[in-house]
Amino acid sequence: IHFRLNSIVPIVRAVQQTPLINPFAREEIKNKCTVSLRLLTGPLRIDPATIFQRAERRQWQRRRQHTALTWRHQERGAAMAANMYRVGDYVYFENSSSNPLLIRRIEELNKWPSFSASHANLQTANGNVEAKVVCFYRRRDISATLVALADKHARELEEEMENREMLDLPEKQKHQLRHRELFLSRQLESLPATHIRGKCCVTLLNETETLKSYLDREDAFFYSLVYDPQQKTLLADKGEIRVGTKYQAEITDLLKEGEEDGRELAKLEEKVWDPNSPLTEKQIDQFLVVARSVGTFARALDCSSSVRQPSLHMSAAAASRDITLFHAMDTLHNNGYDMTRAIAALVPQGGPVLCRDEMEEWSASEANLFEEALEKYGKDFTDIQQDFLPWKSLTSIIEYYYMWKTTDRYVQQKRLKAAEAESKLKQVYIPNYNKPNPNQLSVNSMKPALVNGAGAIPGAIPGAVSQPAGLGRACESCYTTSSYQWYSWGPTNMQCRLCASCWTYWKKYGGLKMPTRLDGERPGPNRNNMSPHGAPVRHGGSPKFAVKTRQAFYLQTTQLTRTARRICQDLLKSRFLARHPYTPVNTAAIKAECECSAVARYDQKAHIFEECRPEASGVCG
């Protein structure tokens, strides 16, 4: 019965929705289907209309579930793509809850297996993924001298481009644009992949784009200089178009037929082989075989070669290298292609000629050093020579490199690297980091503010619930007083805080939204932001202050000390002692002199008072 019901209901629905069928025929088909339904459902006492409604409701529910499932798959796919990090992506790394995020570029993703504490077997399922990354530095990470050098380079670039856009930008946008500038470095480091906090975009400064375009895009940065953390230098990472006499040859005018250019070809060219020699190809091949045999015999006589190639097979292979063939052909050409003279030249009176190339001259330890240096520096032969092989010439190293590429060892290493690259991770999924930040402030954890104006809010309604003390402090960046979440910023004793928006800006861009006096951008820096020499300190958005607030003190002296400054001026020479601070002062003598002078002056004043007293009484009488 269920099978027949499922077959009849779609027929009735199709008949109702088909406009090409005659209305009378449509009703007739529907009636016949209804009769069939009544015959089938008669014993069950089910209304045919109810069956149609249930079927339509069931189909609508299935369509709705399919739509919801499709949307769920799309949202999950978008979330997976946002949290999927691949080699070459620019990402944020967090190394501290209070410091700004680090900006790095992923070079490799490696999964390191972890060891179990109770067993010695590898737990590959619980391995940690590490990312080998290239470091980018912000302006706040480099010294003030290099920041001034970067500003000078930016001004020169503006003058070269004749771009007045930077001067037309408001002060706020100039301040925020400095937060978008990064400095590339060649330094590599390994960081845990679990510390990734999102993606960003870093590009080389494009002269065709406007500077404001970097501010309009979220998580967009640019760089134009390369920073060396070891040497503390900044260099321009800009390609150079090699045009001119230094890089191109000067093309002369086309010569006419039979015209000479005036050069002496004998001084410019030297013929080393004549293909039209009287010797045949067979004779030349026979001479080359003789040269290889002489080379093998010479290696048998040489003690050092016997140690390096202990077997006859290895000596014959070394004697068959190109250096032996080139020497044989040069000998044949220099002797006028005379086989007898050429063979005699191969074996002079002192013994057979031994020809070696760089591959044979290098020892096994030197070859291992070269492979290690090549793994570290790549094809930077100057650094390889300076750090690993200083006793080798640059020509020798380059020649050995191209010979080393023809060996089986190079082919084997290339295959191993290809297999290792295939086994490495191409991407890694890092879920969103949802743990609360330790710098988040709650109402219960806020301490009372120790600044004026942090208590009652002006204009508050009497009797209304006021904020706790300390919560009335404004954001240090945008000066707002309302936010759904606050974060502590700077030293603990300063009790500074940022709103949620400014905290996100601080973590991503390493600075505050609004320019402050601490950035050295406003005139008249305060005393707390000055160096010991009185120069303003460049801050760069860091909450750490350069100079601590000086503790005020009050010097309270006794009355005798103040009296001694007046009475004993001949002993206590204030100006002389101020210019000679290390000159000792005899305080005991000054104290005794002060007491004697004070007593003498007191006796003198008392004697004068006694003499004047009778006269005064007589006058009064």
Image (cartoon, grey):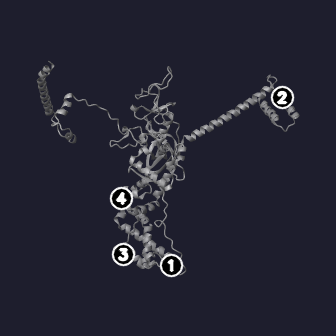
| Circle 3: residue type | Pro
> Residue tagged by mark 2?
34
Neighbours of disc 1 within 10 Å: few (<14), some (14-19), many (20+): few
* Residue projecting furthest to the bottom: 258
On the question of residue 228 being in view, the answer is no
Q: Give the residue at x 75% y 28%.
A: 54
Calculate the distance from the C-alpha at mark 2 to the C-alpha at mark 4.
100 Å
Relative image position of residue 350 (x, y in whole percent): 33, 73
Q: Which mark is residue 348?
A: 3
Query: Residue 203 or 620: which is nearer the viewer?
Result: 620
* Residue projecting furthest to the right: 24
Relative image position of residue 43 (x, y in whole percent): 81, 22
Badge nearest the viewer, 3 or 1:
1
Query: In terms of secondary structure, where does tag 1 sit?
Result: loop
| Circle 2: residue type | Thr
Sooner in the amino-acid sequence: mark 1 or mark 2: 2
> Residue tagged by mark 4?
390
Relative image position of residue 613 (x, y in whole percent): 13, 22
* Residue 277 drawn above or below residue 569: below
Q: Give the residue at x 31% y 32%.
A: 552
Calculate the distance from the C-alpha at mark 1 to the C-alpha at mark 4.
45 Å
